[in-house]
Image (cartoon, coloured by chain):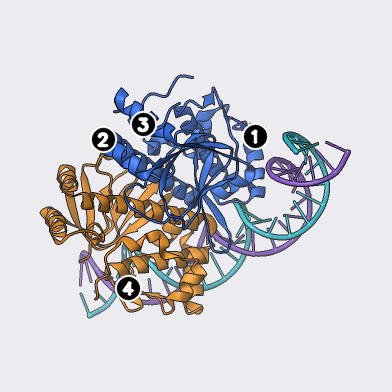
Chain colours: A orange, B blue, C purple, D cyan
DNA sequence: CGAAGGATTGATTAGTCTCAACGCAAGTGG
DNA sequence: CCACTTGCGTTGAGACTAATCAATCCTTCG
């Protein structure tokens, strides 16, 4: 398993082991569509997804919902360890999830024990904002078609870096409603747009499996450039 | 002058002075509409806006532009000190700007000298992502009217915390095109929407002056809740 | 006084939403 | 093992928000 924190290029074997140990300390298994943290909660632990998909979202007073990012294996959900605060968003599972919970003191200790791990944490924060900025750009500037294509590209590339793709395929448990809430579109329009992408031979998506037969072409219609993921700081992806 | 870094609630007088000293070391004065950093550049220094307005933006391959945030006095533009990286976005001024440039080594030294300042830096990162998330939500879920209203609320509240409002008024140097690029709308539609807000008595905007005669009502139509700005960690706003 | 950037207006169109219904597959309880 | 439910995907018709294109009007400033 590749974990984002330990995927950071500069870590030693010992540091990786330390991380693994801390991760194993407290693991929960959660059902699908289950709230992990809700807006307004105090954040006490740091969550790391070990397996499955989760999401960060925000809800307006009248119920409208915006998904802000998806989490997959290895993702640290709340890198915010040093400033006490109430959550300004919610986190919930999409599929069943195996989730590591690290009490903040343990996490801080680990950080203080190793400057490299501290740097890895900064790197994660960096990528987190960068992704959020890309999503803002996507929703603000890209068309429906491009937005969905972009989402597919991002998730595919991220899954690939953690070894969760098989050739041009990967598990993709999002419903069309999830995609709608992530892209700021309606579920109906997402449906029609995906059909169009199918007709164009860019996407196969059914039974929670996504196949991207021509990733390069998809990236180009999505105006996708992976640079915002800052993969240059990551260790080589595991060979599956 | 209130600076975000030194606005963090827990700092001592000595720490504040340290920050002020570092800030004064290298100050540049830039004209309006001037690029400070461009996408693809290496980031070498940390920028802090001392005076004036600036913006962070991203440009798609075909030229479409999305403004990602606005910077006002006190804002740290690139809190990313510990991970070397190339910029995935650009920063430019809107008005003439007085800008502090802190070489990364100096900045790191300051951080290492004081855990409180380090914490302040984490807090800034936290608020930066939180704002970005709110913008994603805004563009994804709010109507044109609500988006613009929300932007007004956010900027007004942020300006107020740094003492840059006078009663219900503040300087507001954004053109309607700027607002359009920030909200993912066209300039024409922004114009019409602002006219509507004027008719509704919620906004007066002319000659780069913004007046919000009924902030509470504006906040409520914008579904604005200041919690994402995490002002609870900030020192009391200066009394003007 | 002229130029330039910004704001405003009008007419038209495109993209996306809304509402509503229907289909299909998988799971559940009797 | 079948009837029912439930969640998700698909389709259609029509409405509406916001985009586009193109002028025109201000205002500021050299």
Where is residue D8, by image quadrant? bottom left
Q: Are marks 4 and 1 on the same chain?
A: no
Viewer-proximal residue, D24 or A162? A162
Point out the tag, 3 or 2, that comes first from the N-terminus. Answer: 3
Determine which of the numbered discs, if any, sits on residue A170 in the image. Answer: 4
Which quarter of the figure is the N terminus of chain B placed in?
Answer: top left
Residue at mark 3 to residue at mark 2: CA–CA distance:
11 Å
Crowding at label 2, few (<14), some or many (≥20) Cα neighbours within 10 Å? few
Whole-angstrom CA distance, mark 2 to mark 1, is 50 Å
The local secondary structure at tag 3 comes to helix
Q: Is residue A232 left or right of residue B162?
A: left
Instruction: Give the CA distance from mark 1 to mark 3.
Output: 42 Å
On the picture, is C27 further left or further right than B150?
left
Which one is in front in this view, the residue at disc 2 or the one at disc 1? 2
Residue that numbered label 3 is attached to: B19
Question: x and y percent of residue B55 in the render?
Answer: 52, 44
Q: Earlier in the sequence, mark 1 or mark 3?
A: 3
């Amino acid at each position: 398993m590749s974990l984002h924190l330990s995927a950071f290029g500069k870590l030693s074997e010992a540091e990786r082991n330390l991380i693994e140990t801390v991760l194993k300390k407290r693991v929960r298994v959660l059902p699908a569509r289950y709230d992990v943290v809700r807006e307004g909660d105090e954040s006490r632990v740091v969550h790391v997804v070990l397996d499955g998909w989760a999401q960060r979202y925000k809800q307006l007073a009248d119920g409208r919902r915006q998904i802000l990012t998806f989490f997959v294996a290895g993702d640290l959900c709340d890198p915010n360890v040093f400033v006490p605060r109430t959550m300004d968003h919610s986190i919930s599972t999409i599929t069943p999830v195996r989730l590591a919970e690290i009490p903040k003191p343990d996490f801080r200790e680990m950080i203080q024990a190793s400057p490299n791990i501290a740097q890895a944490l900064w790197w994660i924060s960096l990528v987190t904002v960068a992704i959020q900025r890309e999503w803002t750009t996507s929703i603000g500037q890209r068309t429906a078609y491009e937005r969905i294509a972009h989402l597919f590209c991002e998730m595919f590339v991220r899954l690939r870096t953690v070894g969760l793709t098989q050739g041009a395929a990967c598990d993709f448990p999002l419903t069309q409603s999830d995609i709608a809430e992530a892209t700021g579109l309606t579920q109906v329009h997402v449906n029609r747009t995906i059909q169009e992408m199918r007709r164009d031979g860019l996407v196969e998506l059914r039974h929670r499996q996504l196949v991207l037969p021509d990733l390069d072409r998809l990236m180009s219609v999505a105006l996708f450039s992976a640079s915002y993921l800052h993969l240059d700081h990551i260790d080589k992806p595991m060979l599956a």
